[in-house]
Image (tube, rainbow, N blue to C red):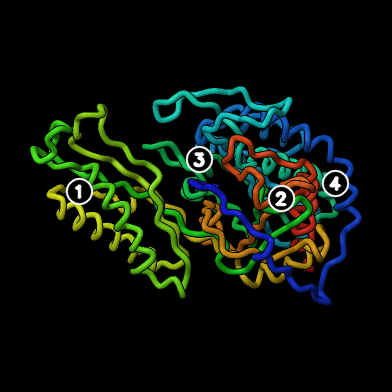
Amino acid sequence: MRQLLLPVLLASLLTPVAATAQDASGRPEVGAAAERLREEVVALRRHFHQFPELSNREVETSAKVAEHLRALGLEPRTGIAHHGVVAIIKGGRPGPRVALRADMDALPVTERTGLPFASEVTTTFNGQETGVMHACGHDAHTAILLGVADALVAMRDELPGEVMLVFQPAEEGAPPGEEGGASLMLEEGLFADFRPEAMFGLHVFSSLPVGTIAVRGGPLMAASDRFTITVQGRQTHGSRPWGGVDPIVAAADLVGSAQTVVSRRSDLAHQPAVVSFGEFHGGIRYNIIPDQVEMAGTIRTFDEGMRSKIHADLDNVARHVAAAHGATVTTEIPAGTGNPVTVNDPDLTARMLPSLRAAAGVENVIEPPLQMGAEDFAYYAREVPSMFFFVGATSEGIDPATAPSNHSPEFLLDEASLDVGLRAMLQVTLDYLEGH
């Protein structure tokens, strides 16, 4: 998930999705495929975990994916949005078209899990040496979809319709100055010759216990916008601040005042919103008041009207607070193009709930609250009816509310979630194709 520290899903906020008479039954072919592929999917996940690659740098990962697909008899297209891989499985019977997506990129995080297959990869990111880790679970997503591909190919002769497999790079966001991810795949013609009638994606989630699936129709994950604010003052010696304009004091006041953009200027009774500062850079010596301070942060919203208003309000607060200190500001609000809201098609979600229940058990499918995290799966969901769901990743005996979150260097995936994810994605795909 892009630009995200995953929120905790407290158990008290989770609502079981009511069972209905239309609940689908578990398919024996799904169970058989899951059993047959269990060890292979685990091995694939461990390989990807041990050799992670950052966004727009997924060279070996995409090569491994393409090699596996060719071994299944498929003809993958490569090089889409830099390192994206796409393959089509054509069934032996007529039917609808569906697309399945997995993301492949890792994060600039130094792993601290102690796993025997832990990443030892290092790189330079934003000028700093860092480790590289699949701290968000994209290694699991890639392995699951390769397993689903294997299962679907094995039953291809009896399969109605066609399935597009989308292995996407750069979900976590392209490096500065580059493009990437779902939006670039679409720009480069992902759906030009194959337009699916539905699309499905999943994400392993540390804040849910293994065996659990969480999904909701309508808005699920927030729109995400990055912003930058530069406060320009006038340098002076720290012993005589009156000789200049202190941008650190102005910037600190700005950070505090900016909290009113949400708490006092946004209608939180309508939808939640967040404005958070994540970067604050200014000065190089303890006794010198610097010329400027640079700040950056994120805005999360679920409503386009609120989104635009928060952009304008934050810019207004920044300019007036800076002026009150005799400083000036330069703002980029937003800085670049952010993710839109991830919206699950309500009708499609209601239709596929029985399939998720069949895969995980009725009592294990729940409706989560709105998530302030963001996902570029949202771009696909704007093009075709889509459903995105969470798969619990935290082992039994560990409190999901306190387990290391996705993006943590200690993020620890229970590999039983691979089995749940494969069963769920395969069940959903088969049920959709056969019109259940």
Residue sitting at the far front: 239
Q: Which residue is mark 1?
A: 329
Say if 234 sits above or below 322 in the image: above
Q: Earlier in the sequence, mark 2 or mark 4?
A: 4
Task: Give me the residue at 19% from left, 58% from top.
Answer: 320
Q: Say which amino acid is labelled 4.
A: Ala
Nearest-to-viewer mark from 4 and 3: 4
The secondary structure type at the circle numbered 1 is: strand
Q: Earlier in the sequence, mark 4 or mark 3?
A: 4
Q: Earlier in the sequence, mark 3 or mark 2?
A: 3
Q: Say which amino acid is labelled 2.
A: Asp
Q: Which residue is mark 3?
A: 81
Say if 173 sits above or below 312 in the image: above
Q: Which residue is mark 2?
A: 399
Task: Give me the residue at 73% from left, 58% from top.
Answer: 213
Q: Position of residue 6 (x, y in %)?
A: 57, 50
- Crowd rating for badge 1 (residues with CA inside 10 Å; few <14, some 14–19, many 20+): many
Q: Position of residue 211 (x, y in %)?
A: 78, 53
Q: Which residue is mark 4?
A: 34
Q: Earlier in the sequence, mark 1 or mark 2?
A: 1
- Locate residue 236: give its quadrant: top left
Task: Give me the residue at 74% from left, 52% from top.
Answer: 209
Asked if residue 203 shows in the view, the reply is no
